[in-house]
C-alpha cells in the first residue's frame, strides 16, 4: 500500500493545530524551514522517519495515526476518510464501494 502524503500532511496539520502550534513553532522544534513544513502539510514533500518521529513526539500522536489513520484511542478513525472518499465518487462508484465493503464485512 502506497503512502498518501496528502493525508499524512493533513493529519500533521490537524495535530499541530490541536496543540495550538504554528508552523513556525513546529518547524523550529524539529529544525526544518517553515517552507518545508508547509510543503509536508500540503503533501508536496515527503518526510523522513526521523522527522516523523520528532513530530509524533511533539504532537503526542502515533506514527500509525499519521501514516494510516490508526489510533488505539479511536474506533472510527477511518470514518472521515471514507466520507471524503465517497463524496468524490459518482453514485455508481459509491454503490460499487458499498457492495464490496458489505461483502467483506459479511464474510466473517
Image (spheres, rainbow, N blue to C red):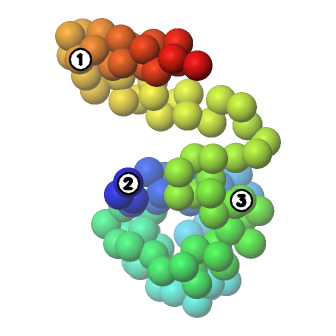
Of helix, strand and loop, which one carries label 2?
A: loop
Quadrant in which the C terminus appears: top right
Instruction: Kindly report the distance in space between the C-alpha atoms of the residues bearing marks 1 and 2.
Output: 21 Å
User: Mark 1, mark 2: which one is toward the viewer?
Assistant: 2
How would you rate the neighbour count of disc 3 (Cα within 10 Å): few for under 14, some for 14-19, many for 20 or more? some
Mark toward the start of the polypeptide (1 vs 3): 3
Residue at the farthest bottom position = 31
Please provide percent x and percent y for residue 48: 48, 80
* Occupied quadrant, residue 85: top left
| Residue with the mark numbered 3 | 61
Can the viewer see residue 20? Answer: no
Residue at the farthest front position = 108
Closer to us: 50 or 102? 102
Quadrant in which the N terminus appears: bottom left
| Residue 61 horizontal side relative to residue 90, left or right | right
Of helix, strand and loop, which one carries label 3?
A: loop
| Residue with the mark numbered 1 | 93
User: Mark 1, mark 3: which one is toward the viewer?
Assistant: 1
| Residue with the mark numbered 2 | 1
99 in relation to 65, above or below: above
Closer to us: 53 or 29? 53
How would you rate the neighbour count of disc 2 (Cα within 10 Å): few for under 14, some for 14-19, many for 20 or more? few
Of helix, strand and loop, which one carries label 1?
A: helix
Please provide percent x and percent y for residue 43: 36, 61
Q: Residue at x 64, y 76 (%)?
A: 53
Say if mark 1 contacts mark 3, CB within 8 Å.
no
Closer to us: 12 or 95? 95
User: Mark 3, mark 2: which one is toward the viewer?
Assistant: 2
Please provide percent x and percent y for residue 6: 38, 54
Mark toward the start of the polypeptide (1 vs 2): 2
Q: Residue at x 46, y 21 (%)?
A: 104
87 in relation to 68, above or below: above
Amino acid at each position: 500500500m502506497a503512502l498518501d502524503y496528502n493525508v499524512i500532511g493533513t493529519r500533521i496539520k490537524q495535530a499541530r493545530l490541536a496543540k495550538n502550534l504554528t508552523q513556525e513553532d513546529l518547524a523550529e522544534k524539529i529544525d526544518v524551514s517553515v517552507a518545508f513544513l508547509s510543503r509536508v502539510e500540503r503533501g508536496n514533500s515527503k518526510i523522513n522517519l526521523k522527522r516523523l518521529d520528532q513530530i509524533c513526539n511533539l504532537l503526542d500522536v502515533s506514527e500509525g495515526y499519521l501514516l494510516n489513520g490508526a489510533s488505539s484511542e479511536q474506533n472510527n478513525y477511518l470514518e472521515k476518510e471514507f466520507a471524503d472518499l465517497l463524496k468524490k465518487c459518482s453514485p455508481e462508484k459509491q454503490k460499487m464501494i458499498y457492495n464490496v465493503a458489505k461483502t467483506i464485512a459479511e464474510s466473517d
